[in-house]
């Protein structure tokens, strides 16, 4: 019996020693993990501090806008919400581009950071093709009919479109005519208005002279009109209206009694 007790005591002491060693190892492992975690935290804090110092050293002091004609430099900067002193490295370019895309004028935008203090913005703007008169208000519109900006008065280099109905395709045809007038430089520095009642009933007003233009073949019709107008002016014929809707003939209606 005594021998068995001694053996049991030896087993218990051995198991206690093993348990103690395990606890010591676990403690050492935890302390090592804690030390490693603290070291990583210190390194991260140092890196963050260094980044903040570098970011403060490279701040936005100049913004150069390239490619803009209609949107001013100050408006581009305002849309981006970038101020002088903003950290160039921490500047979120994606958010700046998202803000710029809210402007209907800007079709494409690119940014480039140039250390130490310069931000370059390239823009590609949309082109106005006409002024749309709707419910007593004036809007600059692009080739798709999207309003770019509201106006208080007309400008001489763009035709004014007045819609007389909501028939589908009417505005589209009026814009096609306006694009030809603008791109081919017809009637420069003259008062030009497009009255659109339907896609087939489009009348062009040039200095109060009505020209029934109809639908399609606008460049051909306008070229004929320019040549015809010169002959009419030379003969000093008072004209009530001109009709260009027919392919093989032109109707010039003189004023009544003249």
Image: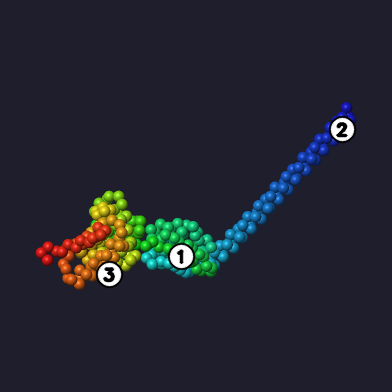
Crowd around label 2: few <14 · some 14–19 · many ≥20 (10 Å): few
Q: Residue 158 is drawn in which quadrant?
A: bottom left
Residue 6 disc label: 2
Q: Position of residue 234 (x, y in %)?
A: 20, 72
- The image's mark for residue 143 is none
Badge 3 element: loop
- Image location of residue 13, percent across then percent down: 82, 37
First along the sequence among labels 1 and 2: 2
Say which of 28 and 195 sits in front: 195
Residue behind mark 1: 122
On the image, the x and y values in percent for residue 23 come to 74, 43
Marks 1 and 2: which is nearer the front? 1
In this rendering, the label closer to the viewer, 2 or 3: 3
The residue at 26%/56% (across/down) is 214
What residue appears at the point 37 percent right and 62 percent down from the top-left corner?
127
Identify the element where label 1 is drawn.
strand
Residue 198 visible at all: yes
Q: Is residue 170 above or below residue 187?
A: above
Of 172 and 55, the residue lying toward us = 172
User: Of label 2 and label 3, which has the lower sequence position?
Assistant: 2
**Residue ID for mark 3:** 189
How far apart are the alpha carbons under marks 2 and 3? 119 Å
Residue drawn at x 69%, y 50% is 33
Disc 3 or disc 1, which is closer to the eye? 3
Query: Which residue is outermost to the front?
Result: 248
């Amino acid at each position: 019996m005594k021998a068995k007790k001694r053996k049991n005591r030896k087993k218990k002491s051995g198991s206690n020693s093993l348990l103690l060693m395990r606890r010591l190892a676990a403690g050492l492992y935890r302390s090592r993990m804690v030390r490693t975690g603290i070291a990583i935290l210190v390194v991260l804090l140092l890196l963050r501090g260094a980044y903040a110092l570098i970011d403060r050293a490279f701040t936005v002091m100049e913004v150069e806008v390239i490619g803009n004609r209609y949107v001013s430099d100050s408006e581009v900067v305002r849309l981006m919400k970038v101020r002088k002193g903003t950290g160039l490295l921490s500047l979120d370019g994606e958010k700046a581009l998202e803000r710029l895309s809210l402007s209907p004028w800007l079709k494409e935008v690119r940014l480039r950071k140039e250390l130490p203090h310069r931000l370059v913005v390239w823009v590609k703007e949309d082109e106005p093709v006409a002024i749309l008169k709707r419910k007593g208000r004036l809007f600059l519109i692009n080739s798709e009919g999207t309003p770019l900006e509201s106006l208080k008065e007309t400008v001489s280099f763009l035709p004014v479109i007045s819609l007389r109905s909501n028939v589908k395709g009417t505005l589209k045809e009026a814009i096609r005519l306006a694009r030809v007038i603008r791109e081919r430089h017809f009637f420069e520095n003259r008062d030009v208005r497009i009255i659109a009642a339907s896609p087939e009933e489009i009348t062009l007003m040039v200095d109060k002279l009505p020209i029934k233009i109809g639908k399609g073949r606008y460049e051909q019709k306008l070229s004929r009109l320019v040549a015809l107008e010169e002959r009419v002016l030379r003969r000093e014929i008072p004209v009530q209206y001109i009709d260009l809707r027919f392919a093989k003939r032109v109707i010039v209606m003189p004023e009544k009694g003249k």
